[in-house]
Amino acid sequence: MRLLLLAPHPFFQLRGTPIDVELVIRALSERGVVVDVMTYHEGTDVDYPGTTIHRIRAPRWLNGVRPGFSVRKLFCDVLLFSRAWKLVLRNHYDVIHAGEEAALMAWVFKLLRGVPYVYDMDSSIAQQMVERLPLLRPLSPLFGWAERVAIRGAVAVAPVCHALGEMAVERGARNVVILHDISQLTDEHFRPSWSLRERLGIEGPTLLYVGNLEPYQGVDLLLESFTVALPRRPDLQLVIGGGTPEDIAAYRRKAERLGVVDNTHWLGWWPNAELGELLAQADVLVAPRITGINTPMKIFPYLHSGRPLLATRLPTHTQLLDDAVAMLAPPDPEEFAAAMLRLADDSALRDRLGAAGRQFVLRNHLYEHYRLRFKELYDLVDFALPAPAHESAAVAGS
């Protein structure tokens, strides 16, 4: 089988969707599929057997593409469509695997060249665009229509969570296989070779957030909640890893205005190789996301670490988590702060939730579980393809 993978974002970068794409490439490579990846100009190459990375050619002013919808991303998508079309004309692809808005590109290629496609659904693009730019709300019906078209045209839809799976079914998907995110860490990763507290010169219970600092992640809620909690527990420390220098500077100013800057510590970009060592040294890991319906990828390594998770009680988390494996609190500064304090004061509760969360990941969310779900997806795709592709896939899998 030969496959074109459309990745409309910088690849590879250490953030949610590119990590998902690398998992797809790894699983396809293990399956013996020849993969052409068409992606943006930014990012580092990955090396998997049978995989070739193709990139758009973009001017410098298109550098710095951030997560979510933007004008810069729109220009990159135009360039991506153009280069992908040339690949489709030049090569015979049995199937296209398309993520995010590239599913609409794949739909066009199917109309023009008859190539079936898989819609890798990491989020609802229609919902994201309206949330990010409320001025686009009048166009919401149009975005919803486009998403339905992409879903109905796919040979299979691979949502990342239950809520997106339900949406895909409601909007007419023919076949749905949920590809839950996973933790790619191992026990070795959670054995620190250095001390976070020594590096920062801090003592007291430590709350840790790791990820980008986009508004949907709820960093504003996190800082406002910390402002409520700190007077009641002055030894609390908040550590934030990730974010661009500009984002960090903006949130540092907010921490200064709120009066919590002395207890708030910014690590900046954090290497993935040391993620487990960082997570293992926190007393509480926080996931304050406030919008979106997809489950954040970060919660899986969070839980895997054995440290307790505090997350917002919203569908983005509750579709997968309950009070047995995590502390869930409403996205309100007072209530989120109360949950912070409860965990800071109760070591037995922290231990219980940490152990339960770790077992949850070990049972359901490691690569071995992803591989089985991916096999289910592409076994289904193989038998939906025309006979030559079906036969070649059968030979590759034998």
Image: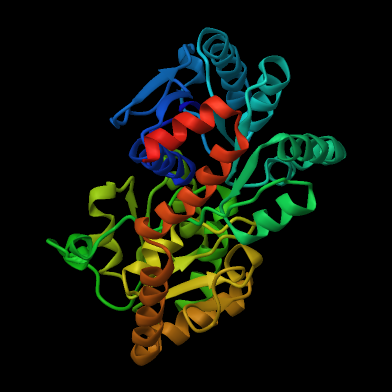
How many marks the image carries: the answer is 0
* Residue beneath the point at 63% across and 74% down: 330
Classify residue 71 as left or right of residue 10: right
Give the vertical position of 149 relative to 269 (above or below).
above
Place of residue 322 in the rendered image (x, y in percent of width and height, measured from the top left): 55, 78
Q: Nearer the viewer, residue 55 or 140?
A: 55
Q: Quadrant of residue 20?
A: top left
Viewer-nearest residue: 388 or 3: 388
Asked if one can make out residue 234 in the rendered structure from this viewpoint, the answer is no
Check the picture and name the quadrant holding the C terminus: top left
- Tell me what residue is drawn at x 59 percent, y 13 percent: 85
Q: State the residue in front, 356 or 193.
A: 356
Location of residue 115 (image quadrant): top right
Percent position (x, y) of residue 180? 51, 57
Residue found at x 46% / y 83%: 341
Is 167 on the left or on the right of 333, as rendered? right
Q: Residue drawn 61% across and 62% down?
A: 316
> Residue 138 vs residue 53: left or right?
right
Using the rendered view, name the quadrant where residue 198 is placed. Answer: bottom left
From this view, report whether residue 331 is shown above or below residue 134.
below
Q: Position of residue 379 (x, y in %)?
A: 51, 45
**Measured along the vertical axis of the image, is residue 309 above or below residue 118?**
below
What's the image's color scheme? Answer: rainbow
